[in-house]
Image: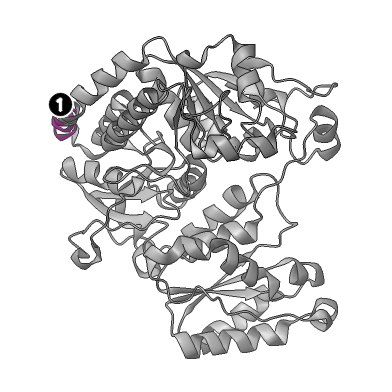
Amino acid sequence: MATNVIDTRISRFPLMTLKEAYALVPDLNARDQVRDAFLEHSSAWCKFIMTYNMIEEMSDAVVLVHAPLNCPSCMKGYKGTMYTDFGNPHLHTPTTNLTSDHVVYGGEKELRQAIWAVDRDYKPELIVILTGCAPGLTLDDVTAIVEQAQPEVRAKLFHVPTSGFDYTGNGFFEDVLPTFADLMDPPDRVDREKVNILGNNKQPYLRARPSDPGCQRQQNFIADSEEMGRLIEGMGLSVHVVFCSDPYRRLRRAAQASVNTLTCASYSLPLAGAMQEKFGTPYVNLAQPLGPVSTAEWVRLLGRATGHEAEGERLVQREWQDLKEVWQECERMVKGKTALVAGSANRPFSIGRMCQELGMDVVQMSNPVGLKTKGIDVEHWLEVGYNPKFIVKDETIPAGSKMAETLDWLGLSKEDTVYFYCDFPPYSRGGTFDAANVARVDTTVHLGRHKGFPSRGGGLGYQGAKGLCIMIMEGIKAARRKEGWTFLGRLYGKPFDSF
């Protein structure tokens, strides 16, 4: 998509469309232009962190970090709590523990020895070697070491160059995700009844499958991919591979499925494209369906791809009857209200689109540079027709701390607003912007959970829509109180008001 570079800094938050905001941002590699255009700086998780996230969700794989000790230590401290549901025994992450000498002279010998030790001690199906910044600078020949060591070990060796400095804004998605197709075996057959789910991240898939009935565990919080799996099964199809969640031994058979479906667009589209190019596997080009309209469209697209159109129509009718009462009550309560949705990526967009289905006016808000960082998401959602109002918000202001002023600028009253704060800090200030006087819905990705409903960042499918409707209605009811400010509103807002 074409980019229009602007000459002046943005000091306010003009209202425009998502498409206009996306075109406004210079390419993230044009660093001088970015600094000239915006008052904030932008950063994104590096390829090492993002790739580590994905591999650690494979129970039969070990991440071997070729880097100084601080790289895996950072990941254990920062990401460790995310993998408790996966039962992965290798979270401590073996490492070559490069010292200052290795940073100067290289650490190829240490890597070779570490590969032997990991294969001997852990006996994994897959060893994924991630290289940090230091070996990226010394140019250790990891490819040659892998080729030499592969005949000497049982595990499959797979190297992903992940130097933190070696990426653009979308480096992980565009550079790393397509390489996972190289871990897949060419299919000896394609089963039209089998469907893959791509884009799952940081959530285990615990629905029982005929090929693996023992994987199901009792749980209170449903993953988005599990709701997608329920709908796939409801059409008479079967879930084949869930990426990322399934072990390597299952992932390598992914090309046997007839079609791929998508949860998060940025975590799935690059791999879906690579599988289509390498194996001819098509994909349903609609990510993160949420709400009766978009989910019905997703069901019909999947039905056409698999020859299950009739089963899909019956599923749509059944699911609507189950959702109808809650949905219509929520429609009544949100009539005339505006959804103010914080975030500039896949899940905030799915929430905004569902709010449009409810009849609400929608304003997305975020820092503009984040749009380019998640450009895969933005371009996908524009392609499928989602182009809401968008506020370009200055990153130097902690997200949420100017919400009362934002409402005034938009001409919105507190009674006419529902605030979805997604991954942004849940700013609250008693008497001005608090859950007691402004309806707010917790749709955070990492911590927001709604018992009995898929709800990671708003959820997915029909059950996600039902759960989100319930949360919206609860937020509207709570906001009628007008007094008795919340604990968060009493303590949290004040430190941020000076910004």
- Figure quadrant of residue 84: bottom left
Quarter where residue 262 is shown: top left
Main secondary structure found in the magenta portion: helix
Percent x, y of residue 360: 41, 15
The answer to whether residue 182 shows anywhere in this view is: no
The C terminus is located in which quarter?
top right
* Nearer the observer, 10 or 268: 10
Q: Residue furthest front?
A: 484
| Left or right: 4, with 232 as reference point | right
Foreground residue, 51 or 383? Answer: 51
Q: Mark 1 points at which residue?
A: 321
Q: Is residue 53 above or below residue 275?
A: below
- Badge 1 crowding class, 10 Å Cα cut-off, few under 14, some 14 to 19, many 20 or more, is few
Query: Is 495 placed above or below 121 here?
Result: above
Decide if residue 329 is on the left or right side of residue 425. left
Q: Residue at coordinates 33% horizontally, 50% vertically from top-left?
A: 196
Q: Residue at x 64, y 86 (%)?
A: 112
Q: Does the magenta segment cover residue 247?
A: no
Please tell me whether residue 314 belongs to the stretch shown in magenta: yes
Going 69% across and 86% down the picture, which residue do you hit? 110
Name the residue rendered at 36%, 11% in the picture: 335
Horizontally, residue 336 falls left or right of residue 53, namely left
Give left or right: position of 38 versus 418: right
List x then y, in percent, for residue 148: 61, 84
x and y percent of residue 323 in the render?
21, 28
**Residue 61 shows in this picture:** yes
The span picked out in magenta is 311-318
> Where on the picture, by quarter, is residue 96?
bottom right
Q: Position of residue 408 (x, y in %)?
A: 62, 13
